[in-house]
Amino acid sequence: MAQFSMPALPPLGVVPDTMVAQVVRAQRFGDPAAAFAVEEVPVPPLGDDDVLVAVMAAGVNYNNVWAARGIPVDVIAQRRRAGEPYDFHIGGSDASGIVHAVGADVTTVRVGDEVIVHPGYWDPADPWIIRGGDPMIAPSARIWGYDTNFGSFAQFARVQSHQVLPKAPRLSWAQAAAPTLVGTTAYRMLFGWPGNETRRDDVVLVWGGSGGLGGQAIQLARHVGAIPVAVVSDEARGKYCVDLGAAGWIDRTAFSHWGVPPHWEDAAGQKAWTAQARAFGKAIWDALGEKRNPAVVFEHPGEATVPTSIFVCEAGGMVVICAGTSGYSATVDLRYHWTRQKRLQGSHGTNDAQAVAYNDLVRDGAIDPCLGQVVDFPDVGRVHAEMAAGTLPPGNTVVRVNAPADA
């Protein structure tokens, strides 16, 4: 295969007809390593409130594993049913870059600004939003670069102006592209649900602590004086989490009760499952050095872990979940849920206020982007396949797009 070379960008303000992108098409759905292909596609037209960003670097997130598989949603077909003419998907929900062009009504950014992009996307005219509702719960809410097209795995990305935030000058392009989707998602999960906001001295159990989401959750919890405990798959990842601020870590491979528990009428099966769940709860105490249960459980595996999360969460506490990477058919034992008045809270994306608050922490140096590795543009499919297999290194993986190798 010939060595890939990204075409040079045109001068600022000059918008070409076409661009190079990593493209998913329905006929390639399946293994992410084969689903993505480099193609030349049209540069998208800009609406009056849109911004065209010349992408320097792009973050890798699990949502485009799903897009590449066409599961649980065929995002291409979904958009075609809504009237979009394009028969392809350009993913990527994290970006750092330079404002290349703006729509007629954009006043918040200027051509040439160095920016990052947050992934919350919605219709400002949505009646829910006009009535004062959280935009990310509105019927029109989407995740940019997953539900929407023209994400960051391309020379240019099209975004709404409210998504564009200032890049921290101290960060490289790759560092700046690394954390925003996972960081803003974690911020909303930990601080976005009144009555169960993470507070000083709260114990916070963080599943997948060494991953992109987990690394941000650990830092955000520690920033407000909470006590994070990470769940990981080996000692090296556990030590990584401690370096980020975790009080301790638990090796999930030491337990065997993952998945849907036995039915409550299966007394022997329930007894065995409960013994394992109690042992996991004791592992939390051992990691803490005291007998305290988590006030907040930071969830995203879903099917494999939600039953245990509900079991170990303290009375009145919250299990907050943003994904289902191990599956979607999670079972909740309502005996522990209603009598101990626990909360199972779904959380998705970010609104503008949460994105700004998170980005301010990054700009101030309070939160590390946790850049794990930087790969070249042709490697988009490979690293999504490795993400699906759980073999990426700790931290966030970033794809170099237009940025030079040393930036």
Image (cartoon, rainbow, N blue to C red):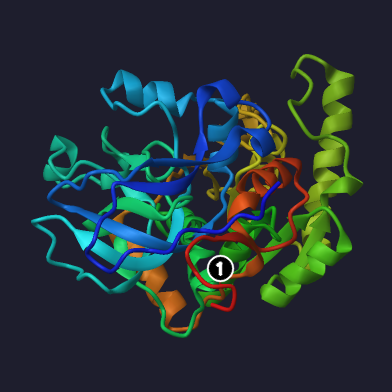
Q: Amino acid at mark 1?
A: Ala
Q: Secondary structure at mark 1?
A: helix
Q: Residue at x 43, y 31 (%)?
A: 88
Where residue 212 sits in the image (x, y, percent)?
61, 58
Where residue 123 sits in the image (x, y, percent)?
20, 41
Where residue 293 sits in the image (x, y, percent)?
68, 56
Q: Nearer the viewer, residue 110 or 354?
A: 110
Q: Nearer the viewer, residue 363 or 310?
A: 363
Up-down: is 213 above or below 175? Answer: above
Residue 300 is left or right of residue 140, and the answer is: right
Where residue 21 sits in the image (x, y, percent)?
47, 46
Give the residue furthest to the top: 265
Q: Residue at x 58, y 71 (%)?
A: 219
The answer to whether any part of residue 126 appears in the image is yes
Q: Residue at x 65, y 36 (%)?
A: 32
Q: Quadrant of residue 338?
A: top right
Residue 26 is left or right of residue 14, and the answer is: right
Q: Quadrant of residue 144?
A: top left
Residue 392 is left or right of residue 18, and the answer is: right
Task: Read off the residue under disc 1.
Answer: 221
Up-down: is 33 above or below 209? Answer: above
Give the residue furthest to the left: 105
The answer to whether any part of residue 290 appears in the image is no
Q: Residue at x 43, y 66 (%)?
A: 96
Q: Nearer the viewer, residue 274 or 124?
A: 124
Q: Quadrant of residue 105?
A: bottom left
Circle 1: is it few (<14), some (14-19), or many (20+) Cα within 10 Å?
many
Up-down: is 349 above or below 140? Answer: below
